[in-house]
Image: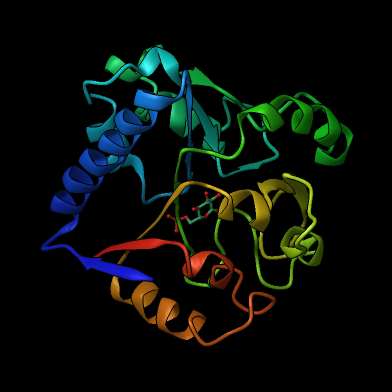
Amino acid sequence: MKLIDYADRDMLAIDLAQQLAGELTAALMHEERATLIVPGGTTPAPIFDALCAADLDWARVDVMPSDERWVPEDHPRSNGRLIRERLLVGRAAAARFLPLYATADTPELALGQLEQVIRPYLPAAVALLGMGEDMHTASLFPDADGLAQALAADAPSLVAIRTAAQPEPRVSLSARALRGSLSLHLVITGQAKRDALSVARNQPPERAPVATILENAEIHWAA
Ligand SMILES: O=C1O[C@H](COP(=O)(O)O)[C@@H](O)[C@H](O)[C@H]1O
């Protein structure tokens, strides 16, 4: 695990966006297309604002959320909505978006169909993930129904997640699918998340799900 400490959140957004763009460009030098996994939540928007202006062949990039809340795509809590509004604009509007949501009452009803769609796009060339103070990453929450399956070595790429801690059910890429990414980044901001990360390093993934990706990940932090 490598931790990069930035002077502030603006520097983090600019430098990290540049690094992600460089990695995508490198991937596109030897592959026809490249998959980019990105998180939702509150942290990544400034990174998206910088990344969407990157000068790369976005028409050959497939963008996939790390996880999705089971709400319609125009809902304020939709990760897909954030990605469309803040990343898939400017130059990045040419990228293809692979939503992890389909119109169905429950994620379980659409899981098979969504998994079939995303499978050819995995493993990702580049993955950016977020983390909550409760040590979840993507939607792999401690104490969630579905966590054991999501952490299993033979897990499907996409799993349904339900937790009392969240207002809606979710879908998430599994630990196996996330770890398979050729380049893996975790972005966290604030002291509380830095402290949570220190705790997570000494916990099993069943208690601190983010631990499942730490070995392979580069961590980006700013206060
Ligand atoms: O619920 C989620 O939380 C994590 C962390 O979000 P943040 O608001 O603390 O940045 C995020 O990475 C994930 O994609 C999202 O669905």
How many callouts does the rendering have? 0
Q: Position of residue 206 (x, y in %)?
A: 69, 76
Identity of the residue drawn at 59% across and 25% down: 98
Residue 131, above or below 25: below
Identity of the residue drawn at 89% across and 34% down: 109
Work out which quarter of the rendered image holds the C terminus and state it. Answer: bottom left
Residue 76 visible to the viewer:
no
Left or right of 71? Residue 33 is: left
Which of 75/171 is in front? Answer: 171
Identity of the residue drawn at 13% across and 51% down: 11
Residue 203, above or below 137: below
Furthest residue toward front: 30
Identity of the residue drawn at 74% across and 58% down: 150
Q: How is the image coloured?
A: rainbow
Q: Position of residue 145 (x, y in %)?
A: 81, 63
Work out which quarter of the rendered image holds the N terminus and state it. Answer: bottom left
Furthest residue toward right: 109
Residue 190, above or below 146: below
Q: Position of residue 123 (x, y in %)?
A: 59, 40
Give residue 126's quadrant in the image. Answer: top left
Q: Position of residue 25 (x, y in %)?
A: 30, 28
